[in-house]
Image (cartoon, helix red, strand yellow):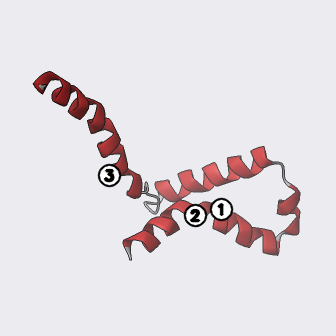
Amino acid sequence: MSDIVEDVKIFKEPVLLSMLSVVFPTIRIWPDSVSAFVIHALHETLGIFGLGGEAEYYKGVLTCVRMRPSDRAKRVRAE
């Protein structure tokens, strides 16, 4: 269930833009830079209203990656 919530957090802005493109077909011909700007603006707007949030799925991996070099250093010193 938490994976579904994380996926929603990740893809809410692009999905909203895709839904808008059904109503306004000219959105499909926007350059990538305009689409990126709109997605960023949607993300910031949702954050202002307290609806935004960072995905939590990567934090465990990031912690593990950050700890690896120190773990290796401790093992080398112990040997």
Between the C-alphas of marks 2 and 1, the distance is 6 Å
* Quadrant where the image shows the N terminus: bottom left
Between the C-alphas of marks 3 and 1, the distance is 25 Å
* Quadrant where the image shows the C terminus: top left
Mark 3 or mark 2: which is in front? 3
What amino acid does circle 2 point to? Phe
Q: Does residue 69 lie above or below 37 as drawn?
A: above
Q: Residue at x 84, y 62 (%)?
A: 28
Query: Which circle's residue, 3 or 1, is located before the other in the chain?
Result: 1
Q: Residues within 10 Å of mark 3 (few under 14, many from 20)?
A: few
Residue ranking furthest to the bottom: 1
Q: Does residue 67 lie above or below 43 as drawn?
A: above
What amino acid does circle 1 point to? Pro
Q: Secondary structure at mark 3?
A: helix
**Closer to the camera in the image, 76 or 68:** 76
Query: Which circle's residue, 3 or 2, is located before the other in the chain?
Result: 2
Q: Which residue is mark 1?
A: 14
Q: Secondary structure at mark 2?
A: helix
Q: Residue at x 87, y 68 (%)?
A: 25
Number of marks in the image?
Answer: 3
Residue 53 at x, y percent in the picture: 43, 57
What amino acid does circle 3 point to? Gly
| Residues marked 3 and 1 touching at CB (< 8 Å) | no
User: Which mark, residue 11?
Assistant: 2
Q: Does residue 3 lie above or below 32 as drawn?
A: below
Q: Which residue is mark 3?
A: 60
